[in-house]
Amino acid sequence: MNDILRDASKYSRIFLFSLTMENVRRMMLDAQRLGMTNGDFVYFVLEPFEQKRQYGYVNYRDPLDPANDEDAAEAFRSLLKIGQCAPRNISKDLDKFLAILSRMSADEYGFHYPTGEKPHEMVMAAYAGMEVYGKIVSEALHDGSDLFDSQALVRRAFNRTFHLRFSEVFVDEYGERRNNYCVSDFNITSKAFENSMLYDVNHKALSYLEGKTVDWGNEDHVVPSNEPRCGYRNLRLLPGCPLARQRATFGISAGLGCVVPLLVIALLYLVIR
């Protein structure tokens, strides 16, 4: 993985991982060993749902490699996680409802969710879909509209946000459900990912959550620049850059190369004369 990171660093400071979650940890440890977690680079990983068995789980801990857990935690300061940002605090009854779903799954279908794992988001999406359908049918009945006009009924759901019992659902102008997404950064103190930024699909805007910032992994707490000061291939002639030092060394060497012959000629002239 070291070669992959070295090659990629010649072209970009932003990396989007499409890896198993175990390999994300390995990649971040390799980046740290290469000095690429000093705040000059930003890494993203997508965690679509909180489903460990299906998607994995972004975690700095590895029971098979506990010796590197602290190094991984430090490296994770440069890692940002993108995932759904469902407003799960809308209802205090949500956890109770999820527990009911888990129990029904075990009793009626013989499927037991692993400890700490909640019912899949797709299950909740089915409940949300039925609740949306109930709302638009109720509106149609209230307006005295024709319930058999399916196109008119469906258009009621377009380009609006539904405030449901357990979530908020936004349906765009094409009838597609769009979810808000959160960008989470790693809190080195709590050693956990915390939501920092929200992408609002309704307004197509990315903004910081109230009172939140992003730890960019550098001492100055500033967003990394678009490219390295000396350029991706160190071709800029700026003070302190490798190419500038090479030019300076070459200039000194060239100057000495001219001075020494001149001194030799002068000495020979004095001796012969």
Image: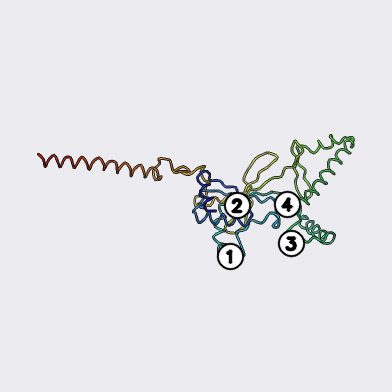
- Residue occupying the point 67% across, 46% down: 181
Q: Position of residue 171 (x, y in %)?
A: 75, 40
Of 221 and 233, which appears nearest the observer? Answer: 233
Numbered disc in front, either 4 or 3: 3
Q: CA distance from mark 1 to mark 2?
A: 22 Å
For disc 4, the marked residue is: 88
Of 245 and 211, which appears nearest the observer? Answer: 245
Secondary structure beneath dot 4 equals loop
The amino acid beneath tag 1 is: Pro
Considering only vertical position in the picture, is 168 above or below 50? above
The amino acid beneath tag 4 is: Arg
The amino acid beneath tag 3 is: Pro
Q: Position of residue 27 (x, y in %)?
A: 57, 54
Is 90 on the left-hand or right-hand side of 195? right
Q: Position of residue 141 (x, y in %)?
A: 89, 39
Considering only vertical position in the picture, is 93 above or below 15? below
Numbered disc in front, either 3 or 2: 3
First-in-chain label (1 vs 3): 1
Secondary structure beneath dot 2 equals strand
First-in-chain label (2 vs 4): 4
Secondary structure beneath dot 1 equals helix
Q: CA distance from mark 3 to mark 2?
A: 26 Å
Residue 66: which disc?
Answer: 1
First-in-chain label (4 vs 3): 4
For disc 3, the marked residue is: 114
For disc 2, the marked residue is: 185
